Image: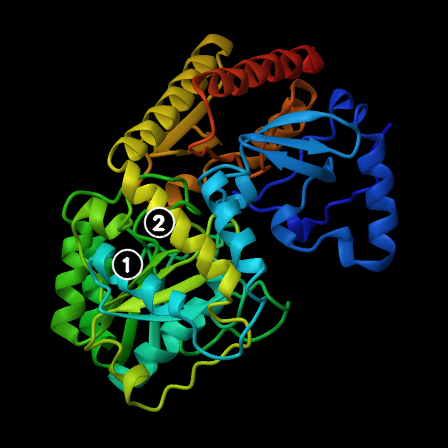
Amino acid sequence: MSTSVEPTAGDVNPLLGLGGGTPLEAVSHVPGSTAYMDRARRVIPRGLASRGRLRAVPVAFESGRDAYLFDVDGNRYVDCVMALGPLLLGHSPQEVIEAVTAQLSRGLQFGGQHEGEAELAERVVRTVPCAEKVVFSNTGSEAVQAAVRIARATTKRRLIVKFDGHYHGWIDPLFVNSPGVPAAAQAPVPLEVTHNVPGQPAPEDVVVCPWNDLEAIDELLARIGEQVAAVIMEPIPFNLGTFLPQDGYLEGVRRLCRRHGALLIFDEVVSGFRVALGGAQELLGVTPDLAIYAKGVAAGLPLALVVGTDEAMASAVDGPVVHGGTYNATPMAVAAALAAIEYLERRSPAVYEQLDEAGARLAQGLRALGVRHGVPLVANQVGSLVQLLWAPREPMRNYADVSLADPAPIAELCERVLADGVYAAPRGLLFLSTAHSAQDVDHIVDAYDNALQRRASAAG
Ligand SMILES: Cc1ncc(COP(=O)(O)O)c(C=O)c1O
């Protein structure tokens, strides 16, 4: 049996990789999902609501609870996708569900202000180091756009510097040099490639620079610094291999941005609330001018925030910036966010120690498998996230290192672990949550152990 999903060359990239064929054991137990995909593809491009969900063996779900997902065929999986980040508290955190249910009976939308907005913003200002003002949005991609607009209006400059392999959402013009696009040259360069629409000229107002290389950004800003509105980065690059910046790098970029009058934006869409309540800026002790929080905010409901200092936000307060959105700060998402923050605040720091321990246990277990099976399995870990890579070299420090990894075996393993009740993403980024127990983590490791065994047997 084979699935009828046929990834094209455009779907293959180093971190969002597909390939390695479709292991038989992975597809034989999902006939209902396969039938669903055949139906969906007739009316939905690729049958997918988001390209980030593309995989060789599609699975259609019926429900989720705690750390588990249940598919339409009745299979249970330990979930290591966790909606690609938002389910930090698991699938069914009681406090959040109660808060959202209570809000439902008070109304779905008001089209005007409600108390929860100011309450949430006050909590965020108390929690996030750079936050003096808070702007509401729905998704990370939208919030990035708002942050860029604010930065341009505040500085009255146009250029944005982004880093090689960092992902800031799917909207133009920042959807360039994301994971999968060949790494830029070793020196900072104007963009030459875009992967949105083939043949489309690269945006002239975005410049790409290698990350974790202070000399490179120093040299770039020395040349064009007076035109740069903002330098945007994932302070912990979860889309680029999941490792920490070199000592002094973030401090150095912070200093350089100040020197050249450019704003520093941290994209904390993944790291926000997940690595610490205040995000990577709290964990690593470097405060940007603006930051974007999204996946960690509302426990699974769509809510994103742009936060920043009064100075950086000046153009949004009484300047020309127009920021709108029918669904901004929708009451249900705000209720969920308040309950989630309350949950995390009440249990800090123990809850973050628990998340770190789960991540470390998973990474250690997977590394041991690499040694036992004699394969180049690398498990990079920061907090509750583990990036699996099939890579010849570690430690990694930039996109050039990560690009040496072969995505195909990792994508293949993610299909093979389905048969042992583990749902993982083809790119190999494994998300844990407060709902994952040590037994769940061990189950994931055992599934990868079996998958490596079966892979070796299949290779003969
Ligand atoms: C670092 C980062 N920024 C922005 C985004 C875009 O967020 P969204 O998918 O909510 O639009 C993502 C999504 O994965 C992300 O990882």
Above or below, 141 against 48 in this view is below
In the foreground, 246 or 442: 442
Q: Is residue 166 visible?
A: no
* Quadrant containing the C terminus in the rendered view: top right
Q: Which mark is residue 381?
A: none
Indicate the amino acid at tag 1. Answer: Arg
Q: Could you tell whether 39 is left or right of 281 in the image?
A: right
Label 2 sits on what residue type?
A: Ile
* Residue beneath the point at 61% across and 33% down: 411
Q: Position of residue 158 (x, y in %)?
A: 34, 82
Q: Nearer the viewer, residue 361 or 65?
A: 65
Residue 308 drawn above or below residue 124: below
Residue of label 1: 123
Residue that carries the numbered disc 2 in the rendered image: 341
Q: With respect to residue 58, does 228 lie above or below?
A: below
> In which quadrant of the rendered view does residue 398 lie?
top left
> Residue 366, percent across and down?
45, 19
